[in-house]
Each structure stands twice: as structure tokens, then as C-alpha cells.
Image (cartoon, rainbow, N blue to C red):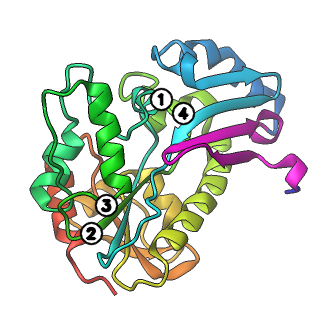
Amino acid sequence: MSKLKKLIRFRKKSSIRLECEIDLDQLFEAEKERGRFEHKWNEFLSSNPYNPKIYSKKKNHLSYTSEQLIPCKKDNRPPILLVFGNPASHSVAAGMFFAFKDNGKESRFWKSILKPTGVLSFSFDENLPAEKLNALRKKQLLELDYETPFRIGLSVFISMPSAPSGPWGGVAGIQKLVGVSALSRLEAEESKRITKCAKAFIGVDPRGKVVTFQKNAWNGLRSNHNPEYKYDMAKGAKLVGCLKDQPKIPILGVPPTRLAGPARNVLEQVVFRKVC
């Protein structure tokens, strides 16, 4: 695919924001596909109050803001890249993965999955407003200012944001919008982005790992000889393999973050395990 006709372009706008642009002519190979997308677009856009703030569609181009937090700082801790399905629209708008809610309530991902496993723990003033808490957490992640045996990076497999739940929620909502075939084309490009990101973040550190929390992410990033995603295998801590085209970087599959208990239990098992 030529540079002039690239399906999706990514541009790093800040330490956490990715500006993305999809060429809709490249995404949809048939008029019928494009027609279905156009028919569903307004309903998708209105499915979350933050969508109109982060999406813009003009003629053949769909532009939106996404998220990716890869600290430039390094230390002696082994790098762990956590890869989720796709961003929640409210978190993208807030400028932080799994953002604090307006009432200052912390996401279960931080308090019920990462903290109990010992993978990542923060200290913060619960009395601060959500906006300041989100900014503080981002700074802590970028500065490696946290209590954990690991150096943490955060990314998403599908860059398009959506509501966290409901008929247009998660990766399923994106698939509903663009269709199975178009999503597969997107995944091929997104996997290149994540593989490149993982290679840069983990480098040659033999202790580094990629951990996926979602079916599409595992299937899109695993090597061909690794098993396809099955929930029972994820729950049993049996999704262990190597990153696509990077045989020295282990990839681990755990249950989705919405299932906090299973995700926590499996994450604790696999992240401390010596894989290679």
C-alpha cells in the first residue's frame, strides 16, 4: 500500500494522545460496506456524549483521538506492555487510561486488578478533583513514580474509541459500526503499530512481556503457531506465546478487565512467571 493511500495514519500528539486518520475509501472495499457504515454512523456518534468531541468525519476521512502511554524514561525494572481492546471515549476525553470519574472514584482496573496483584500501585490524595487525579496518574506513569517491580506501558489494540458498555461499547461496538471485513483490515494495520511499539519499549530485555486483556488483541498480536483465543484458556493462564514477528518477546493473554476477579488472578500468575 503506497504512502499516499495508507489505510490509517497515526501521529503522536502528546505523551498519551494519538491522532489517527482512516481513509474510508481504503477501509471499505465495496459500496455496500460503506453504505452500512454511513447508515450507522450517527447512531454510533451519539451513543456516548464524548464521541463528538473526539471524532470528526469529513468526506472520505475519519479522524479521531486515541491513547497510548509509553514512558520515555527507563530504569532497571523489566518492561511490561499492557494492551487493551480499545479506548473508552470518556478516558480519551479525560486524557488518561481508565480515568477517574467525576466523583473521584478510581477505576476497578487500577484498584481491583493491578494493585492487588502487586503489578502496579499508586499513592494519591483522594480529595483531589478527578481532573487533577488523572493528570497526576499520567505524570506518575511517565515519570515511573510508582511502587511496582515493573516498568509499565499502556496501549490499545483497536485505536478507535467507543462507549465502555452498551450496544456500541468496546471492540464489539467498533465491529458493529465498520463490519467484520473492515475491522480485519484495521487490525492488520493496528498490529503493526503495537508490534513496533512493543519492540521499542521492551527492546532486547529478556524479562519484558506483552500482556493482552482482550480477544482481538491476543489473536492479532500472537504468532501464527500460538493458539487462538479461548476464554477457558485465558482463565486457565494457558494463553502464552510470542509476539508476531518478534519471537523473543513473550505475549500473555488474560481475561478482560470487565471480569476483574479472573483478570486479577491470571495476571498475577503469568506476569511473575518466567516465560522464556
Residue hosting label 1: 162
The residue stretch that appears in magenta: 3-28
- Rounded to the nearest angstrom, the CA distance separating label 3 from label 1 is 28 Å
Task: Determine whether, in the image, residue 46 is placed left or right of residue 190.
Answer: left
- Rounded to the nearest angstrom, the CA distance separating label 4 from label 2 is 32 Å
Give yes or no for residue 6 being in the magenta stretch.
yes
Give yes or no for residue 171 being in the magenta stretch.
no
Mark 4 / mark 2, whichever is N-terminal: 2
Q: Closer to the observer: label 3 or label 1?
A: 3
Residue hosting label 2: 150
Q: Residue at x 27, y 45 (%)?
A: 257
Residue hosting label 4: 174
Task: Determine whether, in the image, residue 36 is placed left or right of residue 74.
Answer: right
Residue type, label 4? Ile
Q: Closer to the observer: label 3 or label 2?
A: 3
Residue type, label 3? Leu
Q: Position of residue 178 (x, y in %)?
A: 63, 32
Q: Closer to the observer: label 1 or label 2?
A: 2
> Which one is nearer the viewer's eye here, 255 or 153?
153
Q: In the displayed image of the protein, which residue is found farthest to the left?
A: 116
Residue hosting label 3: 144
Residue type, label 1? Ser
Give the class, few, some or many, for how many residues have Cα within 10 Å of label 2's Cα (few <14, many ≥20).
Answer: many
Q: Position of residue 248 (x, y in %)?
A: 47, 84
Quadrant position of the C terminus in the picture: bottom left
> Which one is nearer the viewer's eye here, 84 or 31?
84
Residue type, label 2? Phe
Q: Are marks 1 and 2 in contact (CB under 8 Å)?
A: no
- Rounded to the nearest angstrom, the CA distance separating label 3 from label 2 is 9 Å
